[in-house]
Image (cartoon, coloured by chain):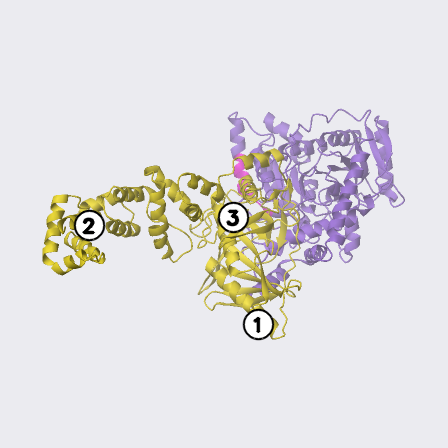
Chain colours: A yellow, B purple
Amino acid sequence: MSDYNVVIGLEVHSELNTNTKCFCSCKNEFGDDPNTHCCPVCTGMPGALPVLNREAVKKAITMGLAVGCSINTHSVFERKNYYYPDLPKAYQISQLEYPLCVGGHIDIEINGKKKSIRLNRIHLEEDAGKLIHDNEGTLVDYNRGGVPLIEIVSEPDMNSAEEAVAYLEKLRSTLLYVGVSQCKMQEGNIRFDVNISVNKDGEPLGTRTELKNLNSFRAVTRAVKYESQRQMDVLDDGGKIIQETRRWDDNLGKTFTMRTKEDSQDYRYFPDPDILAIDVTDEYIESIRKTLPKLAEQIAKDYVSKGLSIQDAELLTLRKEYSSYFDEILKYFDEPKFVCNWITSEVFKRLNNQESEDITIPVSAENMAKLLKMYKNSEINQAVARQVLDEIWQKDSDPTLIVESKGLKQMNDTGAMESVVQKIIDENPKAVEELKAGNQKSMSFFIGQAMRATQGKANPKLVTDIVNKLIK
Amino acid sequence: MSYLDLSLREVRDLLVKGTVTSEELVRECFDKIKETSDLNALTSTYFDMAINKAKEIDLARKNGEQLGVLAGIPIVLKDNINLVNTKTTCCSKFLENFVSPYTATCASKLINAGAIIIAKANMDEFAMGSSTETSAFGICHNPIDKTCVPGGSSGGSACAVASKQCFGALGTDTGGSIREPAGFCGVVGLKPTYGRVSRFGVVAFASSLDQVGPLTRTVEDSAIMLGVIAGSDEHDMTASLEPVKDYTIDLDKGVKGLKIGVPKQFFNEQLKGEVREALIKALDTYKALGAELVEIDLPSVDTALAVYYILSSAEAASNLARFDGVKYGVRADKYEDLVDLYYKSRTQGFGSEVKRRIMLGNYVLSSGYFDAFYRKAKRVQLVIKKEFIEAFKICDVIVSPTTATPAFKIGEKMQDPVSMYLSDIYTVPVNIAGIPAISIPCGKDKNGLPIGMQLLGKHFDETTLFRVANAYEKSTKEGK
């Protein structure tokens, strides 16, 4: 079984964060009441005509440049014709023969091994509406209809679920760094289709299947593992893989046939006569290239020059949410190394417990900076810092007020601490003996007791010093 | 004599002078509409709305307010042009009860110029036809001979102008749908350059060929109306940024020194009988007026009809796919599932000519046939366009008949789609090339049926078309 190669190509749809829709002036906004961002154009009223949103073109080119695509100066919109209630014109405005961006690559790294995944193209198209099923039937919300999407198509250059997810992570991070998409998986901002086949060394590529309905990185990992195994099992049993589209069922953890090649749709693409071809000048492309925001690699380099290790810099730039947060905290509290350690430990730990793969850090950078400042200045100890973080993670608020009102400030008063420690020494002669015998574990006992006696406010370093002094 | 016998420009002069009020004109039009209702030219009328608007304009005029160039003049729209809160049926059962949520740019421009929209006009279903016989709401009759068709697809618009129900109308022209009915009804019909008039709000048949244009009693009226509806539009990317001219400016300049192109492909043995005689006479008139006739060659023009039926049907199949029974229009009463809903709604909602075009269009776009049909037709289109551009290097306008024969009998061609399609043989190449063309009356046959002459112009040179057309119109007694 292990002698099979798995071959994976990905198609990623990402909604662009333009102000208005791709072909009309309706707002591009998620979460409002159904059918409140609609007009004759995006609901396909008879006689309505699309007018191209230049901002969408610019954002698509921006992404293309960020991943090394060449930009076609002549690009054409085509109609992809098919019937579905979420598609009010019964065709989707998309691109086929002349997409905006071609080529390019996304570089990934797994366990220190670098790999470049080639891109086939990036094209611009419009999103469909959304069907809402309830007991009485099916309703359609056209708010999302006509929102600009880019489709990023890779070559079949990935060979494992890990590579696929590393590619998606990198792609997502790039979309966020160049600022063209929100990439919120829960809102359907970014969606994935996986093409997958298996073959043996020296043999031509196997027949591929396309997997749909993958809404998270976790789903991609599971689906790739399931589907590659399924294909290997079919081949090992002497069967054949049928070229088809399969639907991933996240609850059952299985893929199911949606449609085979025989009943695949004929989309009857042709150039949309309502939309003029996009002709962009080289000057325009260069002007976008010049204003490209910094990407992960460049930001990581900046971090290293601020004194972070390469590993830490890469960790922080894995996702834009991390590095933006880091940058923001530094504005209030310029201690890069200290802040980085805290983010990669305490913040990451809490993010890992979040259910969603969309990252939301619930504590404002300003409040986080205040907390870290208190910790760094020994106004609070680590235990208190964690405890307060837990509290403001639940409800973002000013940590200095919490420390103040709950009296959590660290006891740095040597005289007061000496009497506390003396009392512990007097009550625990056995522990004193052990410490004197060289058992350093006993020191933790003293610190623990001191914490208990001070409701966690003792400065552990001060306690250690005093214990050492008093038992001499 | 009635005011209705006057041209749009003449009645405008009387309105300005105060000889007549807009309300009087609206009432006269509605009397005429009632009197000629058997023609079935109109699908909806807006008496109350029109009277109120007329009173408003009369009052404004009395108060000395600045008014638009069409202030107070009753106008009719073809029933594929959206006007907010009114029905836009496209004369299809599918849209029988469809009420427009918005107004087309061309209609807004008319209204902003003070025009009073009094009605919408009958047409072939979704503008597919050359006789107005495919209308779901009954055939329209030719006002000169009721046993004949008025032409199509803008048959209702032409009929309304010819029968004096209004002073001008808008039609749409994809392959001859303004010019052919203008020719059959003896009025003036202009198909402007593609992109000259916004298509926003005009229900699309074939987006790359459709163009809105006026049907009027005179060439001058046509020029006045084009000046109102022409221009760029932020809602239509295909509407040209080319500046709008005063199209009346060269009307009286005459044709002395102009070169009129006579294509040998149009003046061949296929052009017969009274139409041939009428055209030859018209050419003589132009010569007498000082124009020079030059023979021109359009070697590929005979392929235009084939190109047209491929491209227009392909675009129509896609444009009409939105009529699916989900959002508006006909939805079948009973259906099993989604596909059945589509199937039954479309089967019930569309007439047979529309279905024929949809099938043809989907066929030429389907995988395996796309290159042989659609792509090839696009290439031939470029050739035809180039030939016209070449021809216009040696002439200022090109002349042809509008149709090979005068209006045919109702029912005569309904069973033979190809002979119906051939009605557009002289008009279709104009849409394929994207150039402007005007049809003007050019005599009558022995039965009194009008004969149409078509003049073809350079891209965006409607001014010269009006000039040449007006010279002929003035030289004849008819046209007024």
For the residues labelled 2 and 1, say whether their Cβ atoms are less than 8 Å apart.
Answer: no
Q: Is residue B349 above or below residue B375?
A: below
Q: What residue sits 78% from the left and 50% below the top?
A: B306
Q: Reply above or below: B154 against B366.
A: above
Q: Is the same chain shared between marks 1 and 3? A: yes
Q: Which residue lies most toward the right here?
A: B269
Q: Nearer the viewer, residue B313 or B259?
A: B313
Chain that bears disc 1: A
Residue A85 highlighted magenta (yes or no): no
Corner quadrant of residue A50: top right
- Name the residue carrying label 1: A233
Q: Which residue is mark 2?
A: A464
Mark 2, other Cα within 10 Å: few <14 / some 14–19 / many ≥20: some
**Residue stretch in magenta:** B44-55
Kindly identify which residue carries mark 3.
Answer: A147
Amino acid type at circle 3 is: Val
Taking the spot 45% from the left edge, 67% from the top edge, the residue there is A251
Quarter occupied by residue B386: top right
The residue shown at (81%, 31%) is B393
**In the rendered structure, which amino acid carries the disc numbered 2?**
Thr
Question: Which of disc 3 and disc 2 is earlier in sequence?
Answer: 3
